[in-house]
Image (spheres, rainbow, N blue to C red):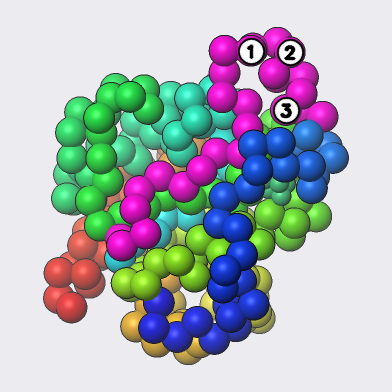
Amino acid sequence: MSNRGTLGEYVGQPVEPDRDCGLCPRLVAFRNVQRAAHPDWFNAPVPTFGTSDARLLIAGLAPGLRGANRTGRPFTGDYAGDLLYETMTDFGFARGTYRADPNDGFELVDAAISNSVRCVPPENKPTTEEINTCRRFFAATMVGFPRLSAILALGKIAHDQLLKTLRIPLARHKFAHGAVHALDCLPGVRLYDSYHCSRYNTNTGVLTPEMFRAVFAAVRRDLDNR
Ligand code: SF4
């Protein structure tokens, strides 16, 4: 990232939390319950998927209990991943065959995926305090992407997490599916919004595959024209 601006304080800070990160007591307790019940699951903060030379950073919400929390790779193993990875492949942001397994050899291309909250929250709902606490890792991750050109926020929580990371007032950039925001403090970086590709959103018609594809098409056009 050419202008680290408000992110300067995160330069050199840890990008990935410790496997036993203890900063969020409620999530630690939930993690310990899962470790006891499913010792073969990942059950730890889920690291970013992809390499830091990517131009596109996709910001998710948090690991799904039986998805990323089980497998250890973002969006891997649950319905949201099926839609996300199929769409990313179609638009050239991934290659290989996605088999819902971190050892499937599936790769991201010029893209990376990180969650706003790295640990699985009960009922997929992190608290405001947990989102705030985990922001340090999201911010440090952003700092480590020198070519960052586009951020795709999957859902309002990810959108807000990004704005708060950059200390931009939320009222300045309202979340809306399909919206594109130029970020004054990060010249050359655009923020794209999409409804989260959760099973709930697709089952209820809030997000259709076509709506999701339209967002990726816009990101693809943008990056191809730079
Ligand atoms: S959510 Fe983030 S800050 Fe909280 S315990 Fe997990 S890794 Fe640590």
Classify the position of the N terminus by image quarter: bottom left
Report whether the residue tagged 3 is closer than 8 Å to ligand 1. yes
129 vs 202: above or below:
below
47 vs 225: above or below:
above
Q: Which mark is residue 39?
A: 1
Instruction: Calculate the distance from the C-alpha at mark 2 to the C-alpha at mark 1.
Output: 6 Å
Classify the position of the C terminus by image quarter: bottom left
Report the residue at 64% width, 12% height from top. Answer: 38
Residues under numbered marks 2 and 1 in contact, where contact means CB atoms less than 8 Å apart = yes
Q: Which residue is mark 2?
A: 36
Residue 212 pos. (x, y %): 33, 49
Residues under numbered marks 3 and 2 in contact, where contact means CB atoms less than 8 Å apart = no
Report the residue at 30% width, 38% height from top. Answer: 85
Residue 224 pos. (x, y %): 15, 69
Three-letter amino acid code at disc 3? Answer: Arg
Q: Residue furthest right?
A: 25
